Amino acid sequence: MSPPADAQHVVIIGAGITGLTAAYRLLTITTADDYLGTPVSVTVIESDSEVGGKIRSSPFAGIIEIDEGADAYLMRVPQAVALSRELGLGLEMTNPTTGHAAVMRKKLHRIPEGLMLGVPTGMNSLAKSGLISWRGKIRAAMEPILPSSGSHDDCVGTFIRQRFGKEVQQFLVDPLVGSIYAADTQNFSLAMVPQLADLAEGRSALLTARARKKSSPARQTPIFETPRGGLTVLTRALQQAIRSMGGSIVTDTKVEKVSRRHKAYLIVTDSQTHPEIIADSMIVTSPAGASATMLSELDEQVSTSLATTDYASVVMVTVKTQETEIASFRGLSGYLVAKPDQERVTAVSFGSNKWAHWQPNDGSMILRVSLGRDGAATHDLIHEWEDERLVTQVIDEISRHTQTAITADISRVTRWPNAFPQYRPGHLAHVEKIERSLTHSSPGVFIAGANMRGIGIPACVAQGENSAKSVVEFLAHLRD
Ligand SMILES: Cc1cc2nc3c(=O)[nH]c(=O)nc-3n(C[C@H](O)[C@H](O)[C@H](O)COP(=O)(O)OP(=O)(O)OC[C@H]3O[C@@H](n4cnc5c(N)ncnc54)[C@H](O)[C@@H]3O)c2cc1C
């Protein structure tokens, strides 16, 4: 199916989950029988040789696909679940076999039950945990009787310390939030962690968290899901659907510059076959640094703002080890290392405990280990380490944490430089400023993706969907 010659052309820059979802949604809307607008042709331009961006998987230890980046998405935020069902992937999905994790603080402590992103919803299970001292527990227990914090800084760490004290922040909320965003919660926007921002609305965060937990319809259902064949099943399904609806995806093509050409936009790329492309509307989903460079001529203010976005780099080491050596950790999905105990490793996922389809048939276990985070003095240097040194570091640290001498039978190293955008306090205002400026300077150009309004896959899917709808509205307005 190819679009008619008079079609309006929409270009999407970046074929990560945000860009692919935007292209897919644009095509489902504009090829539907009830669509009354001018036909639309859609081109996705991707600098890499593959689609998927931060979603990548490859065979490991005899298992067909093991994720190298994201390995699952939250079900509570509904957009990714809905998209995968729409793509017919419902039967491919599986859920973790265990949700119990631990925090490493001198030794492994199971995370107490009933927390909401590290925030206590009661004191019973916290009281039994060795993770927090008695002094820390008493301080946390005072939270419901504290007066409202009033207007507070837009900072996760400050808010949690004010309400629950230093230990809940350091040993519960920071490891949990930090593991999602590779963040230092002392320098991270509260508004960008919606579950915690919501708790800041009421007088007591503990009582609000308890009420939310009780009323949550999803209490008994799984929290995460993923396709058994790796998350690339989702991005490949999107790729296939886009092509089958007449969209084109051009890989190995880097967008270098965008400028105005009358009412349209001229996109200059490094490709010999597509050096210049004209678009009536565009959705930019590349990481902030790349977007800043390509948009510098179009809107200097937007380019400058994007260029200030900080990123954290991580390395993901996947290891196959003999089960017997680490069998006592059966039942745990993994552990997070609290900052005072961190060397290089920030989190360890016991992959074969977490996912039934990641169990090698020789009885060994697959671990996925994260290194690096925002604010770690050494985080950028880790990328320069040889693979062998990284694997040795990981094995040494895990052996110390678990007090079990483990060895790596097989290993794989994936470097993710500048992969996690850091939402500094005031991030939402920064995003709104970018969006406002773009509306005036470059109508029909939209920015979406992890560096804007949410890093998780569901948030990226939501941004892809919303930007597609904004393009459809813009094109209708252009016609009138
Ligand atoms: C190690 C790791 C683990 C994670 N784990 C999870 C998880 O378990 N669950 C979860 O929900 N989220 C997780 N995330 C976060 C989530 O995967 C990402 O936030 C999300 O995939 C980002 O999607 P995106 O489309 O916004 O950006 P990206 O995936 O970064 O896509 C942007 C695309 O733009 C392309 N591009 C860049 N420059 C140009 C250019 N000049 N021209 C053309 N194309 C360009 C890039 O090549 C890339 O493909 C994880 C992330 C990482 C790195």
Image: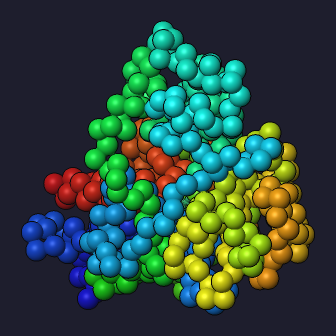
Taking depth in this image into account, of 50 and 456 the one nearest to the observer is 456
- The x and y percentages for residue 198 are 41, 31
- The x and y percentages for residue 196 are 48, 34
The residue sitting at 47% across, 40% down in the picture is 114
Indicate the quadrant where residue 394 lies. bottom right
Q: Is residue 227 left or right of residue 179?
A: left
Taking depth in this image into account, of 447 and 141 the one nearest to the observer is 141
- The x and y percentages for residue 402 are 78, 58
Ligand 1 sits in quadrant: bottom right
> Does residue 311 sit above or below 358 in this rendering?
above
Q: Is residue 280 left or right of residue 315?
A: left
Residue 189 is at least partly visible in this image:
no
Q: Quadrant of the C terminus?
A: bottom left
Residue located farthest toward the top when viewing the structure as drawn: 147
Taking depth in this image into account, of 229 and 40 the one nearest to the observer is 229
The residue sitting at 20% across, 75% down in the picture is 31
Q: Is residue 332 left or right of residue 238?
A: right
Q: Is residue 172 left or right of residue 44?
A: right
> Does residue 209 sit above or below 403 in this rendering?
above
Residue 170 is at least partly visible in this image:
yes
> Does residue 6 sit above or below 420 in this rendering?
below
The residue sitting at 32% across, 79% down in the picture is 91
> Does residue 446 sit above or below 88 in this rendering?
above
- The x and y percentages for residue 144 are 47, 17
Taking depth in this image into account, of 297 and 16 the one nearest to the observer is 16
The residue sitting at 23% across, 82% down in the picture is 4
Q: Quadrant of the N terminus?
A: bottom left
Snapshot colouring: rainbow
Report how many numbered discs are placed on residues in the image: 0
